[in-house]
Image (spheres, rainbow, N blue to C red):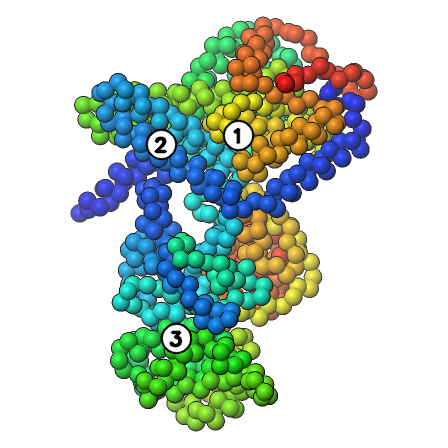
Amino acid sequence: MAATTHLSPQDIEDLGRELDLIRAEVLASRGEQDAQYIRRVIALQRGLEIGGRAVMFAAALPPAWLAGTAMLSLAKILENMEIGHNVLHGQWDWMRDPRIHSTTWEWDSASPADGWKYTHNYVHHTYTNVLGRDRDLGYSILRVSPEQPWNPVYLAQPLYNLVLAALFEWGIAIYDVEIERVFRGEKSWDEARGQLRDMLKKILRQGLKDYMVFPALAGPAFLPVLLGNLTANVVRNIWAHTIIVCGHFPEATKTFTAADIDGESRGDWYVRQLLGSANLSGPPALHLLSGNLSHQIEHHLFPDLPSNRYAQVAPRVRALCERFGLPYATGSLPRQTVSVWKRILRLALPGPAATRAPAPTTGTSPEPVARAA
Amino acid sequence: MLGIRPLLASAAATLTSPLTPDDYRAALNPLWSRNQPSGRVTAVVPETADAATVLIRPGLGWRQVTAGQHIAGQHIDTGFRINGVWHSRTFSLSSPPGRSDGLLSITVKASADGLVSRHIVHALRAGDTVRLGQPTGTFVLPAEVPARLLFVTAGSGITPVMAMLRHLAAGQRMPDVVLAHSAPGPSHVIFGPELRRLAARFPTLRLHEQHTRPAGGNPARLTMAALSALCPDLPERMAWVCGPAALVDEAESHWREAGIGARLRTERFHPNLRTGNGQGGRVRFARSGRETTASADTPLLTVGERSGMLMPSGCRMGICHRCLVPLTEGRVRDLRTGVEHGTAGELIQTCVSAAAGDVEIDL
């Protein structure tokens, strides 16, 4: 980890302690205001969903189609990002509300919540950006690090990424089944078959609702409603994909090897989360619609703190980064999106040579890092 | 025959998937939910300096689920939101079944270290939402009311008995009742004025107030000997005893020794828990993968709730068995007896079991 060679083990332990302190402070101060926040977001989402579907019944009129589709797209985005993702992380479990709890929640996404909680909460959040361990690193189809050996199939990866964006929820659902681990013999066919069955059941249910029942209820407006629902799902997919790739794939984010995490301490883990994630700067609406994954760094440091608190702790995390001379990658949404695409385009081609320090004994100087104003 | 209702329900479930129709019902009005039946507080009426009665208008969902199933003397699970967190506790209903205004009431005494009881007595307001379970429990009046009854209560142990007395009074026929109630002084008697009025109204209701710390007098507990003296026909009466553990324990041995144990019904509201000796350990929740540490004397129910788990719960004193969870690994200590036990698959009462070393439970 070249970016950290200037830090002694003591520094890293100190940093870890400071971050633990921030976490403990938030845990101790969670209360009614936070609870009210998530209840309001949920009420807003339900209102948008009901409103959007109601307006869509008049979809024969183009303005109604547009309004309905926009409301439903927003509802689906909120449902997946600020609500679903965060509830499934257990961020709201402390309220002990059976309606808003990671063990009871199911979301409007093709992935059944149970499988997703494993691949996301456990695999991705534990092994963030570790090649060969974090399956989210390139989602098994993209080459996002020079250490991934090049192969001619990656030539078309800009196209794969576009297709993945449009079909994101389906991509994630299939990816959660971990077919490649079945081929490698690390997972049984029985387990994968069970997961596939659950996934199909869920996809059918979701599809039946969006592409059969609601259009049929609209009678003559069957086709416009179907197209509106399809549009809302695709808009949500593209948005979710954009936010998520901006969290881990901008050029400033680091990737790691299995050797890097050998004997990793709590402090080391924090540092890896910091270096492997990037934030998005923007207005409050961006934070809400991104599910506060615009604070990807804070989310990766503290995955189970309520999302409404990330903005509050972000200045302190950033100050710590400055104090310890660590990069804090952040940029606007357009800038980070361009950065991700540059990386995907560049790595579609062979090379470049891996710049990684092969062993801790090689004293390289800290790499230049992106720091937005 | 395929009913129209299940058909409609499944159509509605398709429209609301992946949520349930009940999620939307609750979003429109929490009182309509059937999965989390609730009620709205209409008033909080002080009874004594540290006790209050909460009047609750049950919502549509609760009325649909409960369908009038309530016997005087039963208790009910209630859920209160305190600083954003739901807390559930069981309280006796102090209201009789089928009150003409449709309200329910619980009567709660604030205990010094009781987060929930203090909230109810001092902070709960009209308009607040309360989650409501179904009335349950066997500390009730039988359908065929016996001719002679004895109630022995202390402190807030009067609440289920109050529901029974109100029920009897509402029916305009009071059988031969002796009520012996202990409280520190006259002003500490929960429902004091109402009890005295009832005794004046019904000659067949004899009220004995035992003031255990009378002003200017000597402390005087209600002993079993004193009880026998003031109720000479005690063996012939059907008896209900509700109060602190010491009172209930004494009554149980007295009735047992007299060979009339079958005529006694008791209800406790505090378990006799021992402080832990020995070690706690790591507690793992197998299904959710959560892990935490537990001390030797913290019930696993509390341990789970503190870590944000949705723990099934009920009476919180080892009686109702609604907190049962399968143990998958390790051993637990029964906090009432101090006995360690546990085999894989055994259902344990989390409210009175603490970790004896590392344990894993199936939640």
Q: Is residue B244 visible?
A: yes
Quadrant assignment, res A262:
top right
Place of residue B215 in the rendered image (x, y in percent of width and height, measured from the top left): 56, 84
Residue A32 numbered tag: none
**Residue for badge 2:** A48
Find the distance from the CA under tag 1 to the CA under tag 2.
19 Å
| Amino acid type for the residue under numbered disc 3 | Met
State left or right for residue B17 relative to residue A281: left
Find the distance from the CA under tag 3 to the CA under tag 1.
52 Å
In-front residue for pair A101/A308: A308
Find the distance from the CA under tag 3 to the CA under tag 2.
48 Å
Q: Helix, strand, or loop for circle 2?
A: helix
Q: Residue at x 36, y 85 (%)?
A: B199
Residue B162 numbered tag: 3
Chain hosting mark 3: B
In-front residue for pair B197/A273: B197
**Residue for badge 1:** A292
State left or right for residue A66 relative to residue A157: left
Place of residue B217 in the rendered image (x, y in percent of width and height, measured from the top left): 58, 88
| Amino acid type for the residue under numbered disc 2 | Leu
Quadrant assignment, res A213:
top left
Chain hosting mark 2: A
> In the picture shown, does residue B191 fall above or below A280?
below
Instruction: Same chain for labels 3 and 1? Say yes or no.
Output: no
